[in-house]
Image (cartoon, rainbow, N blue to C red):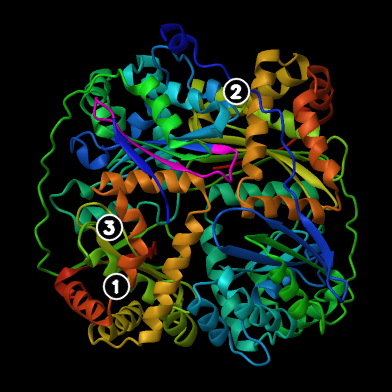
Amino acid sequence: MENLRKYGPPIHTIEQVSLPKYNFCTLDNGVPLYSISQGTQEIIKIEVVFQSGRTYEQKKVVSRACNNQIKEGSSRMSSRQIVDHVDYYGASIRTGENLDSCSISLFCLTKHFEILLPILREVIMEPLFPEDELRKYIQTNSERLKIELVKNDVIAYRTITESIFTKEHPYGYNSEISDYGALLREDLVQHYENNYGANNCFIFLSGMVKDEHIAACNRFFGNGFRTANPREKIPQLIDPHPEKLIIESDKDFQTAIKLGRRVFDRNHADYPGLYVLNSILGGYFGSRLMSNIREDKGYTYNIYSEVDVMKHDGLLLIGTEVNADFAEKTIDEIFRELRLLREEPIGIEELDMVRNYLLGRILNFIDGPFNSGRLLKSIVLSGLDENYFNNLVHTIKHVTTENLNVLANRYLNEDNMWLVRVG
Amino acid sequence: MIEYERKVLNNGLRVIVHEDKSTPLVAVNLLYNVGSKYEDPQKTGFAHLFEHLMFSGSQNVPDFDEPIQKAGGESNAFTNSDITNFYEILPVENIETALWLESDRMRSLVCGKKELKIQQKVVIEEFKETTLNLPYGDVWHTISGNAYKKHPYRWPTIGLIPEHIEKARLEDVLEFYNSYYLPNNAILTISGNIEPDRAFELVEKWFGRIPAGEVKSSNWEQEEPQRQHIKLETRSDVPLRSLYLNFHMSDRYHNDFYVCDVISDILSGGRSSRFYQHLLKDQELFSYIDAYITGTVEPGLFLIEAKPHDKIEIEEGIQAIWKELNALKNGEIEEQELEKVQNKIESSLVFSEVNNLNKAINIAYFEMIGDVSLINKQSELYRNVSINDIRKVAQKIFTLDNCTEIIYLPKE
């Protein structure tokens, strides 16, 4: 026991990680439906997704506004009636948007699924977009934005993403109060008519899913849904030369620092390797940035790096908030960590730790029906297949120091990084 | 329904295991019965600083995070005014790694000057990032400082001021550790794919020989009932006006706790709630409004927080909120509305059981407040709340004398 306590119990390596079994079918009108049945609770989630993000917009912020307003009234029910009905069953309808797609989800106990499905159908297929609801949405969002815009961290994030992609790019523009103010009901209706229909729709079911739930989906979503006419504006590739931007703030706050660059879209062959490299850099608690800048120097509470890949492009972002006195030192240390990854091989012990850590994280991705459902959704919407998942797991297990070194020299060069400092 | 088995080791460590065969993972949760209410009023923020120090290493573990990451797991912790709670989530094959790490830092934490100094800096940056740096970030300081005059809930867990954290010395660290980080002051819960007997065996192996100790007794002053309406206006660097009304309410043990929670849901639980429908949408008074309870073990607060639209007078907003509170005091509630709120609470309890870490934390919490079996009675306790209960509790707490009103105004 003494030795055991001294050296710790043996650690078992995770050998087997595979995507949970899922079921695929198409509804009578051709809508693809993916489902995962998992878990011990009598609960279910249905998520209806449309590829209707920013690249489909005719006007700024319309994609987000349209999807948010879809739940605010239908041909037979007011916003109030919809939410009263759904809430009565302890259920909820939530809307969600990202740069590429929008979705409407219903969460409920399985016993209420068939009672609530007709309401979800009506919300999605017959929205009214009442003028008055839009007016309130604009007012509330404008005031929320005012609060966000005084935060250094928010200013830094908005500045760097806009710099990397440019203002004209759907991934680059920042929503402004004036963009909300310019929204008209007709804009929402037009965005809806262009993008929401059976031919641009995916359905994901997760929870304790049974055949009867899939049959119910076919009854309510397999017919009578209009045909959409989505027109995507493929964004122009603009690659401005990176700069260092310093924004002064009169507030006595911490300084927000962001470094970042364009990388690639989500189907790129370098993604799995960069996923591992980014983890080593700043993607988990034991990462180099955290170990050095938080745990060794104490300059910050949190520092991270992330790789965000979308349908048409992606970015790598490093961010932190520090005391102004430590800002320069922190930036120097970040550049030092980037250089070390480019110039020196990653030790076997560190790499093994990251492999195990990431395999454990992937087990978390597939723990529970909603996590698995989220993973399946991201794979399907990226147009990827099961090999993508297996490939990611394979890369985590087998990527070499040399591979990572090549990637560091490709993606972690100081000259290609934007730097924004606010405060 | 969460099934569990409970056992108390000879050293007083309480252990509770819930088996869930549907997951490849296990959550290990260790709750220490110490939070910021146990602090010296001159050295606030210490319990939370100590939580950070628990990651700095122990006798046989030079680096806490490395083994847990090698084992494919994650670890973290949180501190509030009542408890400090540590957890790991990892593949079940590696559960012993978590038990090794937790038991080693329970028996022999090693913390030197350097570690203390670094974590003081980290926590001060956390203080700035979460409190000083954000618009309205210091509101919790203002609320608790005005609502509580005697009880240690008067300072927030992060601490009263950053200088208190700077003051911490190595002797304080040792004393705190010896006073509270004891097996007989802790609850270990395990939730995941492991049989209870096997889990008990492993816990005995790693924790069984840690000696019990004497837990420092704490006697903090109880708050006297508030007898006068408190009104406060403060100008600070905020973009919009913001309004806070808070009322003293019962402790966690009293049935009024459930009544207050139901009231907060009637007022602001989701988009069908009264505040959302009446005040946001119909009357268009606010861009944001919420009602919630602090949920502390000892007598807590019922809070209402709202941001009025630019053109609305604050007083008009306050009157509209009181009109809603008065309706509850008059018992103006439909059976169906109450039933809706109870249905929502019931389904959110079911949804919360999807996650093993949640289950482990909740089991430990109910054991801490005295009875783990309460975890399976929550739904019923909420179901039992009647319209009459709501009327009576609303009459009791929603009075001017029991109300602290705080208004944040932008600088001119």
Q: In the rendering, which numbered label is found on residue A271?
A: none
Q: Based on the displayed image, in which of its 4 quarters is residue B393 positioned? A: bottom left
Q: CA distance from mark 1 to mark 3?
A: 31 Å
Q: Hey, what amino acid is under mark 2?
A: Lys
Q: Are marks 1 and 2 in contact (CB under 8 Å)?
A: no
Q: How many marks?
A: 3
Q: Is residue A347 above or below residue B283?
A: above
What is the distance, in whole Å, between disc 2 and disc 3 at their CAs? 43 Å
Q: Please name the residue that numbered disc 2 is placed on.
A: B70
Of marks 1 and 2, which one's residue comes earlier in the chain?
A: 2
The residue carrying mark 1 is: B384
Give the percent coordinates (x, y) of residue A65. 68, 73
B38 vs A45, left or right, is left
What residue did someone put label 3 on?
B143
- Say whether residue B14 is magenta: yes
Q: Is residue B74 visible?
A: yes
| Residue B81 in view | no
Residue drawn at the location 75% of the way across and 38% of the way down: A243
State if disc 3 and disc 1 touch (CB < 8 Å): no
Q: Circle 2 marks a residue in which chain?
A: B
Residue under mark 1: which chain is it in?
B
- Mark 3 or mark 2, which is nearer the start of the sequence? 2
Residue B165 in magenta stretch: no
| Label 2 SS | helix
Q: What segment is highlighted magenta in the picture?
A: B9-25
Q: Tag 1: residue type? A: Asn
Q: For this rendering, which residue is in front, B33 or B145? A: B33
- Whether residue B255 sits left or right of residue B120 in the image: it is left
Q: Quick one: SS at disc 3?
A: helix
Seen from this angle, which residue lies furthest bottom?
A76
Quadrant position of residue B144: bottom left
